[in-house]
Structures are given as C-alpha cells and as structure tokens.
Image (spheres, rainbow, N blue to C red):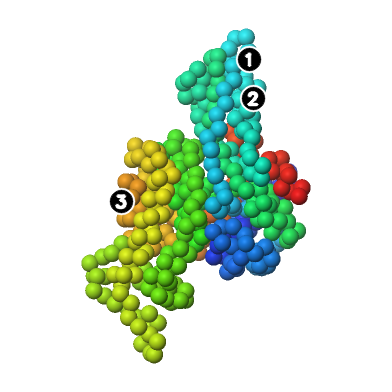
Amino acid sequence: MIQQNKIVGAVEIGTSGVKVLIGDIVNGRSLNIIGMGQCSSRGVKKGEIVDFKTVSNCTHAALMGAEKSAGVQVESVYLSQTGGHLRGVFNSAAVNVSSSDNRVRKSDIERVANEAKSKELAPGLVYIHHMQNAFLLDGEIVENPLGMEGSKLEVNYWSVYGDENKIRDHIHVINGFGLNVEDMIISSIASGIMVASDVEKRQGVLVIDIGSGTTDWVLYKGGVIVQTGVLAVGGDHILNDLSIGMQLNRKYAERMLMEFGKANIEKQDRDEKVWMVGDQTIGDRYISKQGLVEIIHARVEELFAIIATQLGDKCDPEIIRAGAVLTGGVSALPNINAVAGKVLGADVRTGRNPSWVREDLRACEYSTTLGLLHYALTGDDKDEADEEPRNKGLLQKVAKIFAA
C-alpha cells in the first residue's frame, strides 16, 4: 500500500508576531517538521485582529517563508485562537437509559453528549471546543459507561466559545492565501499538550502561556481539561507600564526589560542604577533598578492574581497537585516562577518542549505552534463520546463562518 503524506501548516497569529511551522505527516503515524517562517506582527491587539490587511500581509509572508524553507506547499492549516472574547462554560445534560435491561448503549452516550453540546449561545457567538469531563451513571463517576447497568446517564463538558466575527477574521486571513483551516485550537490547549506530561494532567496541573498581548491558561485534572481562560494582559502591558512609570519611550523600555527585567526584587537591586541608553552620551540617564523591578513585579503579581480569581475554588493545592507550568515568551522573565508560586500557592516550573523536538524549537515561544502540529497528527483534542477527531467537524461546527 502506498503511504499517503499530508503537508500541514501550524499558524499562530500573535500580538508580537506570526509563527508558522510546516509538518509532513506520513501515513497518519509520524510527523516531520520541515519548514518554518516568522514575521513581526502589526495589526493585532490583545490577540485580536484590528488591521486585517496588515495582518494578512504578515501572515502570508510567514507562510511563504515557511513553504520556501520546506520546499513544498501547505495543503491545509491548523490555526490557534486567543483573545479576550473567548469564554468558557460548563454544559451538562442527563438522559434516561433507553434499553429494557438498563444497559448503556452507544446511542445513549451519543444522545446525552449531543444534548450537552447543543446548548444555545447568544447571537454572534460560536463554539470552538467541547472538552468532555466526567460521565455519571446513577450519580457515580465512570470513565466509559458503555455496557454498564444504570438508569440515568449524565455528562459534563467545558465548552469554549467566542465572537463569531473575530474568529471569522482569523479564518479569512488563511483563506486569503488560498488555504482552508482544517481546525482551530485555542492557544492554551495547544501549548498544554507540549509542556505538561500525562502524569501531571492526571494529578492536576495548570498551564499558563504568557504572550505579548494575552495570557492563556488551561487546567487539567484526571487527565482531562476542566477549565480554560484568557486574559487580555501580557508582555506588552509590562512594557507600557515601564514606559509610563519610568518615562521611557518603547524602545528603551524594551531594552530595560530585556537586559535588567526581573519579576522580584533582589537585595542587590535596591541601590543599583542602570543607564537608559547605555552609551552614556547626551540624553542618557540613570534608571533606578529597584524602581524598574517594582513596576514589573506589580504587573506580574496582578496577572497571577487575576488567574487565581478566575480559577476560584479550583486554585487549591489539592486540585493542582502537579503545580503550574509557565510557557510563552514572558515565562523567561527571571524570578517569575517565585511570584507565580506565591500567588497561586503551588509549585511552579518553566515549561520546555519535549526532547524529540529539534533544539531550535524547544524554547517556550514555540509551544503553541508545535501543539497545533501535534493535533494535526493525533487528533487528541476530540470529543470522546463522539469517537471522532475534531478535525472532521470544524466546518460542521462553525459552518456559517466559512459560508460568510
């Protein structure tokens, strides 16, 4: 039998840049990363497109660069999605087992799953993901109720939805390059698959992806996704705080953050001063390192405090037993793990992509695009009750977006 190859692109349209990876999927069993392209981003604010033409040009440049490096053309795209418009809700449903012997049939499972996932949204909103949590049979949690005896079957889903127009904008950027979006994955889930282990996901782990314009997080427990969230806060907000607080233009604020930035004040920082420009010429001046770090610390501490509030009673060491994993570009900020750990009350580590990933892609900023390729290969983000991968049904779930 002839092996069938599939060339897929993983595209992340971020606030600071567009990243594209190209993967060669061989016979649905193995993945080779064969191309890469990047472009500095403009026209994206807090993860949402505000200048369609500029974003399209940048994305198309990154795609062309990736195709050139791969020497092949992309056949379809897996696209990440973020932005403050994304929300999540628990959807539940219950049905009576229909068979006379009270044995759960496949039709019962499909019926309860469809009912839970068909909850209506307000006009202008559309579902992106339905993450199955627990089945309950007569009130008892079961992993797979098929064939078991009971009278009442229940299921819970964490369902993520977003603004139809904002989602459509991202899809149309890809369509403008003559490509179809095979599937759309929210950024936190794509990153989570790369930086958290299966053991951690069973124990309970919180993955936090801190980018330039947004911070995306996902909570795993019992091996499944139980909650997600997006904050319209990221590294750009730290830069803005430094620019205003230290009276610096953005160029120098970025230099201060990259060279001297920390999330926590250390003893040696208290009396140290650093040069704003660094060449000690006219216009250069001293900056208090303590003042610099205090501004960064305040924003970082606030970010984790907001996540803790969104988690509510799930921000508990008994739930997050494996602690938290930080990824994304801002996760490289020195001392950020200590601040996160203090606020969240959990052990915190910096994420790293798996060892099978080539060395130049192991940095945290590639977690999302690598996660997209993983989904392209495995279809791991699937509705288990349906026993079908999501990539079969994106067009069905958001058909009106593609038809517009």
Q: Element type at marker 2?
A: helix
Residue 27 position (above or below residue 256): above
On residue 111, the disc is: 2
On residue 342, the disc is: 3
Name which quarter of the figure residue 378 lies in. top right
Alpha carbon distance from label 3 to label 2: 44 Å
Alpha carbon distance from label 2 to label 1: 10 Å
Residue 351 position (above or below residue 270): above
Residue 220 placement (x, y as % from top left): 45, 40
On residue 290, the disc is: none
Give amino acid for label 3.
Answer: Lys
Give amino acid for label 2.
Answer: Arg
Is 261 placed left or right of 390 in the picture? Answer: left
What residue is at 56 percent from the left and 65 percent from the top? 17
If you read the primary sequence from the N terminus, does the residue marked by circle 3 or circle 2 appear first?
2
* Viewport quadrant of the N terminus: top right
Tell me the crowding category of disc 1: few under 14, some 14 to 19, or many 20 or more residues within 10 angstroms, Cα based.
some
